[in-house]
Image: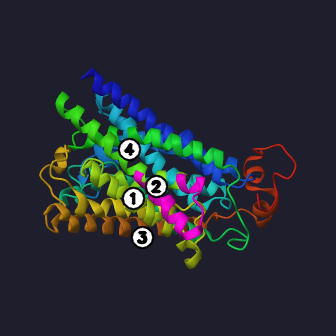
Amino acid sequence: MDGYYAWMLMATAMVLLMTVPALALFYGGMSRSKSVLNMMMMSYSAMAVVGIIYVMWGWSTSFGGDDVAGLFGNPFTTFGLKDVPWESYISVAFQLTFAAITVALISGAIADRVKFSAWLLFIPFFVTIVYFPLAHMVWNADGLIYGWGAFDYAGGTVVHINAGLAGGILALVVGKRIGWPREQMRPHNLTLTMLGAGLLWFGWYGFNVGSIVFAEGDGGPKDTAQFMSETGFTFMTTTLATMAALLGWLVVEKILHGKATSLGAASGIVAGLVAITPAAGSVSPMGAIVLGAISGGVCAWAVGLKFRFGLDDSFDVVGVHLVAGLLGTILIGFLAAPDAPNPAAADTSGLLYGGGFDQLLIQLAAAGFALLWVGALTTIIALAIKHTIGWRVEDEDEVTTGIDFAQHGESAYDIAGSTGSSF
């Protein structure tokens, strides 16, 4: 199937684009002008560091190593891609991009205040201890959660619950930005954010539709009919959920705040994409619309909770990725359609299709386990860094100098006033 491998090369490039430049632009536009380069550097550096680590021991720990109690693979079995067949390299590259964007997503929760060195130290510990084992448990045929029969087509638990909760924990450990929430810290360039959101939407077709490669857990191609039906189906569900979420966000935003904003539209796009990620192969087109509308509306409400709880989650990683990831994972238990073409979900019905509570309970268990795993281990890593090299930049660098100049010796905009305290 030459066409299959050609598509997987394209899908891999599209997921890489989701991190650089799409997420970098999305987050960069939401930053203050004195922080935009640092924010974008966090995405670019995540891709570089995770990519090298993934080839060394990430693939082995996630998919290529001998299983250890259903929790992770032996990191030394295929260390450095030893004995991995050439034809499997596309699978390695595809999964590498998933690991990279998971880490990059976390950075949005701690914008404007973190030392670049601390971020670079966090990355290898997080992917090794948290991400690689969770990917093994959910997507590997020998994995613990896979064995429960939980559905996660492209990363509701592994990517979004993971990144959302990890971002929230880092925001708590690192602490609030100076002046938050009293001082207005508005996005400096929403045009960049809107462009980033559009590129994320485009790249997400590689993310979801490309995940057909692991739908049966074997990393191999399907027959032509199966390949065509499953890719077309996941393309459609991804599209519909995203459209519905955009509209759902804007409706709730208008009700709550009186305005339907461009930032709300961009955030709604991401909320819909996140929610459909675990469910793309399991829900019908109508189910995708329902899932997207619920996720967009709920996330539009949820992002405001950070002010109530005093959590300075800079770019709403918790309110979007954690909340939408949980919704997408759990609502499969209600909306799973028995005629969906994903063979892993064949003949499985959600509660609304008369399937009873079985799948719902499985999805709840998978989400709950992911929360416990990520929460406990990320807290340990975050506290270890806090009490060794420390997370925070100097107060003067955060407020006056600007983190771009302090950490990188550069300024995004060589104009007067670019290092002001608010923008």
Q: Whole-percent x and y of residue 373?
A: 37, 66
* Whether label 2 touches label 3, CB < 8 Å: no
Please give the label number shown on residue 376.
Answer: 3
Classify mark 4: residues with Cα within 10 Å, few (<14), some (14-19) or many (20+).
many
Residue 78 visible, this angle: no
Mark 2 or 3, nearer chain start: 2
Please give the label number shown on residue 4.
Answer: none
Give the structural element (helix, strand or loop) at label 1. helix
Residue 298 visible, this angle: yes
Mark 1 and mark 2: Cα distance apart in space: 7 Å
Mark 1 or 4, nearer chain start: 4
**Main secondary-structure element of the magenta-colored stretch:** helix
Mark 2 and mark 3: Cα distance apart in space: 35 Å
Q: What amino acid is at disc 1? A: Ala
Q: Dot 4 corresponds to which residue?
A: 239
Give the structural element (helix, strand or loop) at label 2. helix
Whether residue 249 appears in magenta in the rendering, the answer is: yes
Q: Nearer the viewer, mark 1 or mark 3?
A: 1
Span of residues in magenta: 244-265
Q: What amino acid is at disc 4? A: Thr
* Whether label 1 touches label 4, CB < 8 Å: no
Q: What amino acid is at disc 3? A: Ala
Q: Determine the residue positioned at 33% across, 40% down.
A: 235
- Colour mapping used in the image: rainbow
Mark 3 or 4, nearer chain start: 4
Mark 4 or 2, nearer chain start: 4
Q: Is residue 65 above or below residue 150?
A: above
Q: Determine the residue positioned at 19% across, 47% down.
A: 340
Please give the label number shown on residue 247.
Answer: 2
Classify mark 3: residues with Cα within 10 Å, few (<14), some (14-19) or many (20+).
few
Mark 4 and mark 2: Cα distance apart in space: 13 Å
